[in-house]
Image: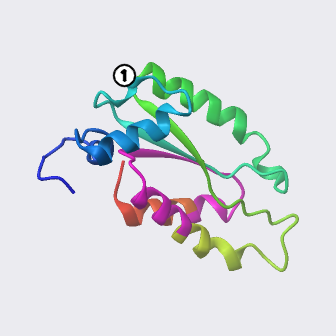
Amino acid sequence: MSEEKFDRRSQYWFGLKDKGGYIHRERLRNQGYAPDVFDGRPVIGIANTWSELNPCNGSLNDVAEAVKRGVWEAGGFPLEFPAMSLSESLQRPTTMLYRNMLAMEVEELIRSHPLDGVVLLGNCDKTPPGLLMGAASVDLP
């Protein structure tokens, strides 16, 4: 990492003026994001556990779109990413076997990406605890 000091964690990816910073910015510019989203605004991850295999989380894509609008309106830069969907109604023998795996997945996704904060989207009885356990381990807002 650079010797530079930034106020936001994401700036260690996007705020650098070297080749690495350029590459990180260009990877997202290739997806259609304007250059001004890398101006130091907070990057807010949206962990979405939506899945067609999970009726409990069927509404979460719509919720994610509303969250994105809210983050944009508040001056942030929202980036949605998928997280494991735990469906007690279709998954056997029980989703309890996967709750801790979800926690580990969420922790590593948040820790390894340029996020300053995260919104966790999940329903049912095992998904929210898994999301919260993973996020708490990273200690981001």
Q: Which residue is mark 1?
A: 36
Along the line of sight, the residue nearer the viewer: 55 or 83: 83
36 to the left or right of 132: left
Task: List x then y, in percent, for residue 90.
Answer: 88, 65
Along the line of sight, the residue nearer the viewer: 13 or 79: 13
Q: Is residue 95 above or below residue 4?
A: below
Task: List x then y, in percent, for residue 19.
Answer: 29, 45
Query: The magenta stretch spans which residues?
Result: 105-130
Q: Is residue 41 above or below residue 129?
A: above
Q: Residue at x 26, y 38 (%)?
A: 15
Quick one: SS at disc 1? helix
Q: Residue at x 52, y 71 (%)?
A: 104
Q: Is residue 115 magenta?
A: yes
Q: Is residue 38 above or below residue 91?
A: above
Quadrant for the N terminus, please.
bottom left
Along the line of sight, the residue nearer the viewer: 59 or 83: 83
* Type of the residue with mark 1: Asp
- Note whether residue 133 is visible: yes
Q: Is residue 22 magenta?
A: no
Q: Callout 1 environment at 10 Å: few (<14), some (14 to 19), or many (20+)?
A: few
Task: List x then y, in percent, for residue 57.
Answer: 75, 48
- Note whether residue 10 is visible: no
Furthest residue toward top: 73
Q: Residue at x 71, y 59 (%)?
A: 85
74 to the left or right of 103: left
